[in-house]
Amino acid sequence: MQDIDYRMHRGLDRRLMLYLAGCDWIRQKQNVIITSPTGVGKSYIACALAHTACLKGFKVRYFRLQRMLEDVALARAEGRLLKLLRTLSRLSVLVVDDWGLKKLTSAQQDDLLEILDDRHQVSSTIATSQLPVERWHQAMEHPTLADAILDRLVHNAHRIQLTGDSMRKQIANVNVPENPEDSS
Ligand SMILES: Nc1ncnc2c1ncn2[C@@H]1O[C@H](COP(=O)(O)OP(=O)(O)OP(=O)(O)O)[C@@H](O)[C@H]1O
Ligand SMILES: [Mg+2]
């Protein structure tokens, strides 16, 4: 967390980050939602928060949303669903990266609700998305399940909305001479 360069992230409130670094939000079973266009640093900030929590002894796990739902479907097929759900429910912090990349089916929403219901007021979740929270509902097939899912996640969540250009563009901005002979 101390490595975060605040000049790199527009929309990142230093005071909020200082509070989150103290991990009281985890003790109080609060959530964090990070949104921004692609490449602005959502996963980076989510992992920085998760890493800080790890260092303070909290049990943490990271998933991309689609992968987590695939793991749940596989666990169900292999008869170890309850074991996986129990494992997930015991995590102090669950990072769920990349919400809203693909529309969730009703079956996937059922699974997600199961996971979030176990965590509601018991443990913390970090969710990230390219979509603003107001559009998450549209990224789910079943509206009533969507209400239930968002109700458990959004109301007690700290929101971080990052803005700006993709850092991948800046990182990849290597200097190539226009005429290779210029460099000799
Ligand atoms: N503060 C930072 N300092 C240095 N590098 C950073 C910082 N924030 C992000 N980066 C780098 O910028 C790149 C993009 O960041 P990141 O993957 O977190 O973006 P993202 O918002 O999650 O993108 P996407 O929506 O595509 O998943 C990564 O290579 C990451 O390591
Ligand atoms: Mg990301």
Image (tube, rainbow, N blue to C red):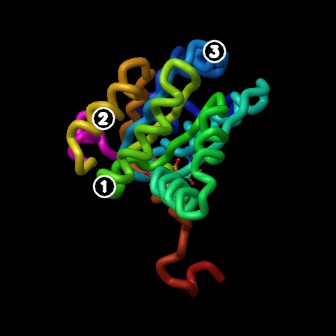
Q: Is residue 119 visible?
A: yes
| Nearer to the camera, 37 or 157 | 157
According to the picture, the residue beneath numbered tag 1 turns out to be 105
Q: Left or right: where does residue 55 sit relative to residue 60? A: right
Tell me where residue 45 sits by quadrant.
top right
Residue 160 locus on image (x, y percent):
43, 28
Residue 22 locus on image (x, y percent):
66, 16
Q: Amino acid at mark 3?
A: Arg
- Magenta stretch secondary structure, dominant: helix
- Find the distance from the CA under tag 2 to the CA under tag 1: 18 Å
Q: Is mark 2 within 8 Å of ligand 1?
A: no
Which portion, as a residue range, is magenta? 130-139
Residue beneath the point at 31% across and 55% down: 105
Q: Circle 3 — which element?
A: helix
Rendered image: mark on residue 27 = 3
Residue 71 locus on image (x, y percent):
56, 57
Residue 136 drawn in magenta: yes
